[in-house]
Image (cartoon, rainbow, N blue to C red):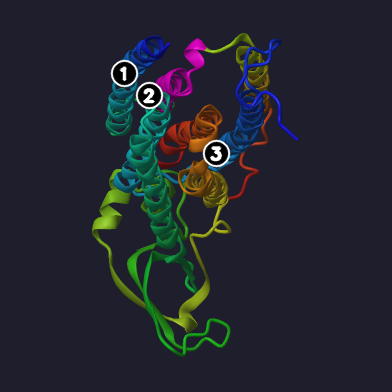
Amino acid sequence: MDIPYTVQPRQDTGLYNAKVGIWLFLASEVMLFGALFSSYILLRVGAPDGYWPHGWLNIPVGTANTLVLITSSITTVMAWASLKMNNFGKFKFYHACTILLACCFVGIKSYEYHDKFTHYSIKLADGKIADGHLVEKSKDFDLDKKTGDIVIHGHEVDLNNKQGEELQKELSKIYDLRSTEGRAALREHKELKIPAEKIASMETYGPWHNTYTAIYFTLTGLHALHVIGGALVIGFLWGPGAKMWKTDPERFTNRIEISGLFWHFVDLVWIFLFPVLYLL
Amino acid sequence: MSDAHTHSAAHADDHFSHHVRRYLFVFYALLFGTVITVLASYIPFGHRALNIGVALFIACGKAFLVAGYFMHLISERKMIYGIMAFTAFFFIGLMGLTLWAMGDFPWNTVTH
């Protein structure tokens, strides 16, 4: 059975069907990410003073990933334009770049996730908080049995009996790493060896840590799934799917346009995610 | 027939070469916008809300460039504009409801 209007535009819409389809899908995607941005706003304004994190993510790394995604957008549109100009070789080159850039984006994002999963917030028995990246755990380390010790590269914060401005300054050492106090705390990082018996509780900076990490992992995780999904589709069209260029070049060009529209949307979402999560 | 075809192909090439120049311009503008966004975040505008406003303003400009030129929204069919108008209506409604909800938000009920 032939699928109608894969190349010829319908008279009523003036478009081939897949184009209407992808825009309807993107409309639903706008609402999906919109709902999560709405959650972000409410979580942020609802957070107690001094507890919403700033500077928890590496800005140069995030900037590099933004540039990677923007570059993948230009290679995507150039791949489509190359087909329009009947240059299949250039299309293959540009989309090979797109796939490599997508892999690069996911690789950098994985590195950032790993950084968070090795970052510990340790509540000590005396009420202080030790915060830093894992260096090593002794082989016999067991928090329940209170045996062994853990070494982190970080600093200690004492929130005990602090109120008002004093509390805010101390909180900045953990939550606002772009503030004067936060930057000073980072400069003072050293290796801290903490015996398990002195630890009340500990956890990594995973999605469970606080509302910021929860929304950060939700938003960037969903976005990363879109990048992976888009890269798989583009990879298929670059590889086995490219056979269609010989049999039905116009339809193939339309497929590249549709996958490109999805890819640009993924870039567009990141344009907002980057400042919201990394900079503000 | 063959001459007409060659002429038409050459015309298409010219047409897309013009587009390619535009895409490259948009690409450079997006790179510039990213650098400006990062630099602006280091400038204290007096209140954090101002920094948020500036960053979102630049992000909207970049989003316009991507949607307008890479996604060709600047010259699309009415049908697509119709879909986008509905989307914009509901998206703005969603954000409006979010801001409205902040008016009677039970402060500090979100634990860190």
**Which structural element holds mark 1?**
helix
Task: Left or right? Give the position of A221 relative to B99.
Answer: left
How far across and how far down the image is residue A102, in percent? 42, 47
The residue furthest left is A187
Q: Which residue is mark 2?
A: A85
Q: Which residue is mark 3?
A: A44
Q: Residue, x 41% and y 86% (percent of image)?
A: A138
Q: Is residue B87 above or below residue A117?
A: above
Q: CA distance from mark 3 to mark 1?
A: 46 Å
How far across and how far down the image is residue A22, in percent? 62, 29
Viewer-nearest of discs 2 and 1: 2
| Mark 2 vs 1: CB contact within 8 A | yes
**Mark 1 chain:** B
Magenta stretch, residue numbers: B52-75
**Which structural element holds mark 2?**
loop
Query: Considering only order in the chain, which callout, 3 or 2, is on the residue closer to the N terminus?
Result: 3
The residue furthest front is B1
How far across and how far down the image is residue A11, in percent? 69, 10
Q: Which residue is mark 1?
A: B17
Q: CA distance from mark 2 to mark 3?
A: 48 Å
**Which structural element holds mark 3?**
helix
Q: Is residue A194 above or below residue A77?
A: below
The reply to the same-chain question for discs 3 and 1 is no
Considering depth in this image, is A37 or B85 the residue closer to the camera?
Answer: B85
Would you identify the image quadrant in which residue A190 lies? bottom left
Whether residue A191 is visible, yes or no, is: yes
Q: Is disc 1 surrounded by few (<14), some (14 to 19) or many (20+) residues within 10 Å?
A: some
